[in-house]
Image (tube, coloured by chain):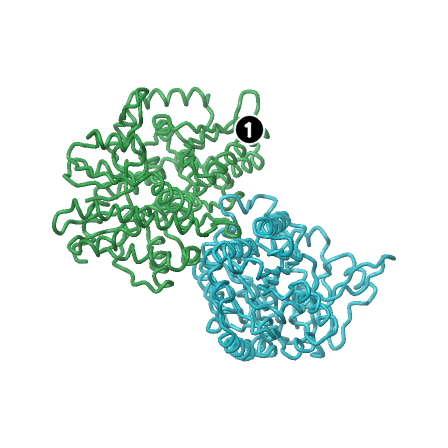
Chain colours: A green, B cyan
């Protein structure tokens, strides 16, 4: 069994108000879906919208080879649990994003939202307990469901739950921001299962340090980074839509070199310093003016949260400012594309000269692995040392301190300066590194974590 | 010898443009001055203003029983080293204050400021090397002079330098915000002396963890919290000016109970959540409306930094908002006093019912120790667990999670509810705890740190 906030299917309402499939589910669910196809697994997930709720009622939540179970919290509970706690608190805690002098404001209203988060986890526990066969293994995904492993242990001691964290895990000083009882409840929730997994050693260590700091006994832990599927990526790169999108990108570039980034617009992704660093590069290295374009494929998300609206506006402003300072009649230094166009993003990945992945803190960052697999231009990867994938790719990536704007500019310059043979050598080595793990390894590690536990 | 940014004397210009003593030096220098009076020590410090520079030129920088040596950086160097690096970067790093998605912006301008910081430390090294006798011990104070111990070791290997940090020390993930070479230079600067001291175990551990994270060999470390001088405090409490200020406070209170805070207006001091918590208290506990006053003695500082101007405005707004919501014709719930009136602050310390000390992160917090010594109302100490003094006072203070607004309100309620006998018992025990260390212990620990080193 799998339990995650978002399921493999999502729906939207068409003009007649009928629920219709809404394209890719995105995020984590999109990465896990191929691993579970035809597995016969039961996948428990939330109805996240009215369309999802209607689709469930009409029996549309079905998928070949999977059994889908939908949790249907009332919209207010869901908004408080998902927006206020999961995305505006836990995401910020694990990514160290709070401007601590001002946020969070953990007042009586927040306490109500925490109750909603607990209720939502309890709804999952009820749904899983109801659907699970004797002794089943339950793979619990991410920070939305931190409390679920302990709840399952209490409700159904025969089950074996594995919690996997796809984000970073907070350092002790950031977890201590939460009310003491909440921090303990969170850790005790996660430690109630058979094992807890992370994408990299650093986040595992953070979790263990938090357990020690709060006096909570740690469960078995393991490290298992997700890997992209090379066959799927190759197929997709060859698709007519991607090829067409690639042609349009070539036309736009007009023979110029391309620095690329592909991210959700999220403060953790550090888009601002990407633009500031590009500005520093153009200031320090006049020979690149008119010759290089920073393409930022930056799709908006979580637009219901004021933090994200504000950040989105700052991102647009920072991009525009580079163009105002350095742009010429026939050259926009920065092309910011906030449309969520997966084909275009994917086509750009095949073509970049430099891929800039500079998050402040990132659970893994799958783009840093997908890019090298599909890129055909011997592109260089400039990778934040605070991304989970840095642990795997550090030997063949250029290291970026994401906070250091001048340093990031220097790395971009180094990447653009690199001779063709060095680029080719590095790109080949990077492809080999990325290919060391297969998508199925992650699933095997999760299932294996309960065997001796 | 002692080296610190600020010296024991500071000057201002009178109407005729003549430098005249400017009252108390404030901060760290004020705490160290009594320990060094008549010691015959040489104290090396900066001329921080034109008045200081003129006073030096006119031979006014002299003090009984001390030899004063003044470092005179040019104003631009000083502004970059002191404002940009020390106060707007290192202070923020050690206190975890950055809104990391947006700040700091470590660009080419910041790199110039770092050079200025290095130059200022080098000016100190030259002045100390010039003034120091063979084999002298040099007590280097605080984050303004992180590079001085190594510079001295290179210039004058016969000297024995002890660095003492009066702030918290950053966790590794926050020190990593600095450019890699800068983080290493900083640690190597501090580790170049014979020993490095901290106010509490937690900051010492942070420093050691940073050394390990950056691959820098740690020096000998020690923990030695400063203690206030009970005799000096008693004398001051009995002074006519304090007694008069106390009478005015009593009149203003009109028999109501008093929650007090005394801080610089600094984001680390967490004034906003103090007001939010008081608002929560009045919301949750109607019986306190009209009966309790929050006196906030909050003196402005570092007003040259935009971060402090913005925070100051937010503080005033938050205080005003509580009064707008809950105030009545004859009751202002919050009295915010931004005038730096030490007599008034001191008089308030003798009188509080509850002393709220809720910093986000604080090297020691001497007010948390001074208050219990001079208070005559069996006042309760509500103390942040993130203040250095919490390690010493935790058994007799009420623990505050400074980020938890609802929790802080609950602690204030608990303090106000406490029966008289419990308050008296706790206040006596707290005085005993605070009195366990004497001011001279800190100096002895610092001097002792070089004996076997």
Q: Is residue B55 left or right of residue B28?
A: right
Do we see residue B114 in this rendering? no
The chain that hosts pointer 1 is: A
Q: Please name the residue shown 49% across and 65% down the image.
A: B203
Q: Residue furthest right?
A: B16
Mark count:
1
Describe the element under mark 1 as helix, strand or loop: helix
- Looking at the image, is B56 positioned above or below residue A363? below
Of A171 and A10, which appears nearest the observer? A10
Quadrant of res A418: top left
Q: Please name the residue shown 62% across and 69% down the image.
A: B349
Q: Residue furthest left?
A: A134
Of A68 and A168, which appears nearest the observer? A68
Q: Is residue A278 left or right of residue A115?
A: right
Q: Position of residue A203 (x, y in %)?
A: 35, 53
Q: Position of residue A24 (x, y in %)?
A: 29, 30
Would you call the spot at circle 1 few (<14 residues within 10 Å), some (14-19), or many (20 or more)?
some
Q: Position of residue A31 (x, y in %)?
A: 27, 38
Q: Please name the residue shown 49% across and 75% down the image.
A: B422
- Looking at the image, is B394 positioned above or below residue B143? below
Do we see residue A300 in this rendering? yes
Q: Position of residue A306 (x, y in %)?
A: 47, 39
> Which residue was labeled with disc 1?
A323
Quadrant of res A253: top left
Of A339 and A56, which appears nearest the observer? A56
Q: Quadrant of the N terminus of chain B?
A: bottom right
Q: Is residue B444 left or right of residue A83?
A: right
- Looking at the image, is A337 positioned above or below residue B160? above
């Amino acid at each position: 069994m799998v339990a995650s906030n978002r399921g493999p299917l999502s729906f939207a309402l068409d003009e007649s108000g009928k629920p219709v499939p809404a394209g890719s589910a995105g995020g984590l669910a999109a990465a896990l879906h191929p691993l579970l196809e035809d597995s016969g697994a039961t996948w428990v997930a939330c109805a996240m919208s009215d369309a999802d709720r209607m689709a469930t009622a009409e029996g549309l939540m079905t998928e070949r080879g999977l059994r889908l179970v939908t949790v249907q919290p009332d919209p207010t509970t869901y908004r408080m649990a998902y927006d206020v706690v999961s995305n505006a608190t836990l995401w910020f805690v694990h990514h160290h994003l709070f401007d601590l002098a001002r946020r969070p404001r953990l007042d009586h209203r927040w306490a109500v939202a925490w109750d909603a988060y607990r209720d939502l986890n309890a709804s999952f526990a009820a749904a899983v307990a109801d659907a699970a066969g004797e002794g089943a293994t339950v793979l619990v995904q991410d920070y939305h469901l931190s409390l679920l492993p302990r709840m399952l242990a209490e409700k159904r001691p025969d089950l074996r739950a594995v919690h996997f964290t796809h984000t970073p895990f907070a350092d002790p000083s950031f977890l201590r921001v939460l009310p003491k009882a909440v921090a303990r409840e969170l850790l005790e929730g996660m430690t109630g299962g058979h094992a807890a997994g992370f994408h990299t050693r650093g986040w595992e260590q953070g979790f263990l340090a938090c357990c020690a700091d709060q006096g909570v006994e740690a469960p078995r832990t393991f490290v298992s980074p997700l890997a992209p599927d090379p066959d799927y990526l190759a197929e997709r790169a060859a698709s007519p839509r991607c090829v067409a999108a690639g042609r349009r990108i070539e036309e736009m570039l007009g023979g110029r070199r391309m620095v690329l980034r592909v991210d959700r617009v999220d403060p953790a992704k550090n888009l601002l310093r990407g633009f500031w660093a590009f500005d520093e590069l153009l200031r320090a290295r006049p020979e690149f003016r008119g010759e290089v374009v920073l393409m930022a494929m930056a799709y908006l998300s979580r637009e219901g949260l004021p933090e994200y609206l504000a950040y989105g506006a700052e991102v647009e402003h920072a991009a525009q400012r580079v163009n105002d300072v350095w742009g010429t009649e026939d050259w926009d230094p920065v092309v910011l594309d906030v449309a969520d166009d997966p084909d275009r993003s994917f086509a750009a990945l095949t073509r970049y000269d430099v891929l800039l992945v500079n998050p402040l803190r990132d659970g893994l960052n799958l783009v840093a692995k997908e890019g090298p697999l599909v890129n055909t231009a011997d592109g260089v990867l400039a990778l934040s040392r605070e991304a989970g994938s840095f642990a795997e790719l550090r030997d063949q990536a250029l290291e970026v301190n994401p906070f250091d704007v001048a340093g990031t500019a220097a790395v971009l310059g180094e990447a653009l300066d690199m001779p063709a043979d060095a680029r080719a050598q590095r790109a080949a080595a990077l492809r080999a590194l990325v290919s060391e793990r297969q998508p199925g390894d992650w699933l095997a590690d999760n299932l294996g974590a309960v065997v001796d536990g």
